[in-house]
C-alpha cells in the first residue's frame, strides 16, 4: 500500500482540503460555516494580498468578519473574500515539473541590460 | 464615593446629567458586550462583538472626559473619567434599563445592540448638528462606529429572524423580552429636554421606521405592546446593574486610585 503524504504549506488548499461544503449539501442544522480566503489592499495603488482565512455563513458576513479580524489596525482600504473551495491550488508534490524547468532559463530575466542612471524604480 | 461637592454639582446641572446619561449608556452596554469576550459563538463573531464593545468604551471615555472637565472647572476639584465610571453608585448611573439587562443568548445580545445602536445612530446625528461643540466632535467620531454597529446588528437580526425555526423562535423570545425596555430611550426626561426637546420626536420616528424595516425583513412582527419600563435615566435600575457594577468597579473600590 502506498501512503499518500501531502505536505501542506501555509495558504495551500488542495481541492480535497477545501473548506466549505459540497454543492447541494447545504441544509438546516449544518454546524460548520464555510471557509473563506481574505485578500486586503493596504493602500491605494497597491494590489490585494492574501492575509488569511476565516469562517462565515455567506459573502456579506465574510466581508464583515474580514473587516473585524484583519483590518483592526488600519491595514486596509479594500477587502476581497473568496470561498476557499473555489481556489484551485497547484499540487506541492508537482513543484518539480511545475517550477524547476524555469530555473535554468536565466535569459528570461531582464538582467543583461545596463540600465541608464536616469531610469528609476526598476 | 465621589466627593459631595462633585455629587451636588452633578445633581444641580442638567448639562452634566445629560452628558453622563450618554456616557453611562455607552459604558454599560460596552461592559455587557465585553462579557462575551472569549465566549462568542465563533471566533470571528467573538472578535466582532469585542471590537464593538471597544468602540462603545471609547465613546464612553470621550463623554466621561468631557463631563470630568466640566466638573473640574465648575467645582475646582480635579475629577477624572475613572472616578465617574468607577466611583458612582447604581442610583447615580443614568443608563437606560435595556443596556444593563443580562446578555441572554446570542439572539438577545444582537437584538439589544440593534435596538440601542439604532437609537444612538439617530441621536448622534442630531448631536452632530447641535450647539455643543464638544458633543459635536464626539458625535462626529462616533457616528462611523455606530453606522457599523447598526449594520452588524441589523444583519444578525435578519439572519436569525429569517433563519431556522430555532433561530426565529429565539429572536421572537428576545423581542418579547426587550421590547418593553425600548420606550425609555425615546422619551426624553427632564434633564434631556433642554438639549433634545425638538429633535426627540424626529429621533423616535426615525427609530421606529428603522426597526419596522429590519423586523419586516427578518420576518418578525412589530410588537404591539406599548407599556414601557422606565427609571434608568433617573437612577432607578433593575437588580442587574448592582451585580454589573460590583464586578466592574471592584478593583477601584478595593484599591482606590490604583493605576497600571
Image (cartoon, coloured by chain):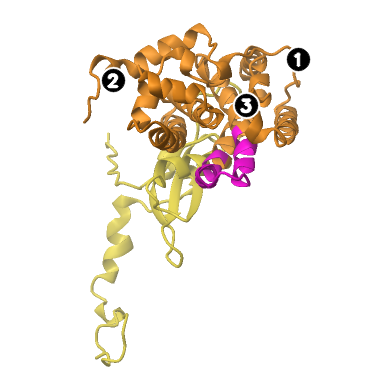
Q: Closer to the N terminus: mark 2 or mark 3?
A: 3
What residue is rendered at 53% in x and 9% in y?
B238
Residue at the farthest right position: B224
Task: Give how far across and how far down residue A72 sits, in percent.
Answer: 40, 44
Residue count near mark 1 (Cα–Cα under 10 Å), binned few <14, some 14–19, many ≥20? few
| Residue bearing the label numbered 2 | B252
Task: Give how far across and how far down residue B242 sits, in percent.
Answer: 43, 10
**How many numbered marks are there?**
3
Q: Closer to the N terminus: mark 2 or mark 1?
A: 1
Residue count near mark 3 (Cα–Cα under 10 Å), binned few <14, some 14–19, many ≥20? many
Q: Closer to the N terminus: mark 3 or mark 1?
A: 3
Which chain letter matches label 2? B
Chain letter for the part of the structure drawn in orange: B
Q: Which residues are magenta?
A: B120-146
| Residue bearing the label numbered 3 | B115
As for residue A42 lying within the magenta part, the answer is no
| Residue bearing the label numbered 1 | B226
Which element is circle 1 on?
Answer: loop
Between the residue at mark 2 and the residue at mark 1, the CA separation in whole angstroms equals 40 Å
In the image, B238: left or right of B244? right
Amino acid at each position: 500500500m502506498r501512503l499518500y503524504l501531502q505536505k501542506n504549506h501555509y495558504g495551500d488548499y488542495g481541492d480535497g482540503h477545501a473548506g466549505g461544503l459540497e454543492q447541494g449539501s447545504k441544509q438546516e442544522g449544518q454546524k460548520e460555516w464555510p471557509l473563506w480566503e481574505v485578500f486586503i489592499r493596504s493602500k491605494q495603488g497597491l494590489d490585494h494580498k492574501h492575509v488569511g482565512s476565516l469562517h462565515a455563513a455567506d459573502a456579506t458576513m465574510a466581508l464583515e468578519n474580514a473587516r473585524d479580524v484583519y483590518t483592526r489596525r488600519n491595514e486596509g482600504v479594500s477587502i476581497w473574500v473568496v470561498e476557499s473551495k473555489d481556489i484551485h491550488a497547484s499540487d506541492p508534490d508537482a513543484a518539480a515539473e511545475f517550477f524547476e524547468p524555469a530555473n535554468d532559463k536565466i535569459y528570461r530575466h531582464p538582467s543583461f541590460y545596463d540600465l541608464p542612471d536616469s531610469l528609476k524604480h526598476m | 464615593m465621589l466627593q459631595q461637592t462633585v455629587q451636588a454639582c452633578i445633581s444641580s446641572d442638567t448639562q452634566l446629567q445629560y452628558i453622563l446619561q450618554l456616557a453611562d449608556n455607552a459604558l454599560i452596554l460596552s461592559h455587557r458586550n465585553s462579557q462575551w469576550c472569549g465566549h462568542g459563538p465563533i471566533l470571528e463573531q467573538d472578535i466582532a462583538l469585542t471590537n464593538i464593545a471597544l468602540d462603545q468604551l471609547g465613546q464612553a471615555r470621550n463623554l466621561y472626559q468631557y463631563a470630568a472637565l466640566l466638573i473640574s472647572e465648575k467645582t475646582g476639584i480635579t475629577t477624572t473619567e475613572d472616578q465617574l465610571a468607577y466611583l458612582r453608585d447604581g442610583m447615580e448611573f443614568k443608563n437606560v434599563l435595556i443596556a444593563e439587562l443580562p446578555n441572554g443568548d446570542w439572539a438577545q445580545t444582537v437584538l439589544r445592540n440593534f435596538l440601542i445602536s439604532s437609537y444612538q445612530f439617530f441621536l448622534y446625528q442630531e448631536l452632530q448638528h447641535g450647539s455643543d461643540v464638544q458633543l459635536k466632535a464626539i458625535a462626529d467620531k462616533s457616528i462611523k462606529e455606530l453606522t457599523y454597529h447598526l449594520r452588524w446588528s441589523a444583519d444578525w437580526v435578519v439572519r436569525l429572524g429569517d433563519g431556522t425555526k430555532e433561530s426565529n423562535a429565539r429572536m421572537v423570545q428576545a423581542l418579547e423580552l426587550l421590547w418593553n425596555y425600548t420606550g425609555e430611550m425615546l422619551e426624553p426626561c427632564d434633564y434631556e429636554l433642554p438639549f433634545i426637546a425638538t429633535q426627540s420626536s424626529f429621533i423616535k420616528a426615525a427609530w421606529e421606521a428603522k426597526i419596522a424595516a429590519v423586523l419586516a425583513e427578518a420576518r418578525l412582527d412589530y410588537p404591539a405592546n406599548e407599556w414601557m419600563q422606565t427609571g434608568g435615566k433617573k437612577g432607578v435600575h433593575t437588580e442587574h446593574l448592582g451585580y454589573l457594577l460590583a464586578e466592574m468597579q471592584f478593583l477601584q473600590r478595593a484599591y482606590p486610585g490604583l493605576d497600571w
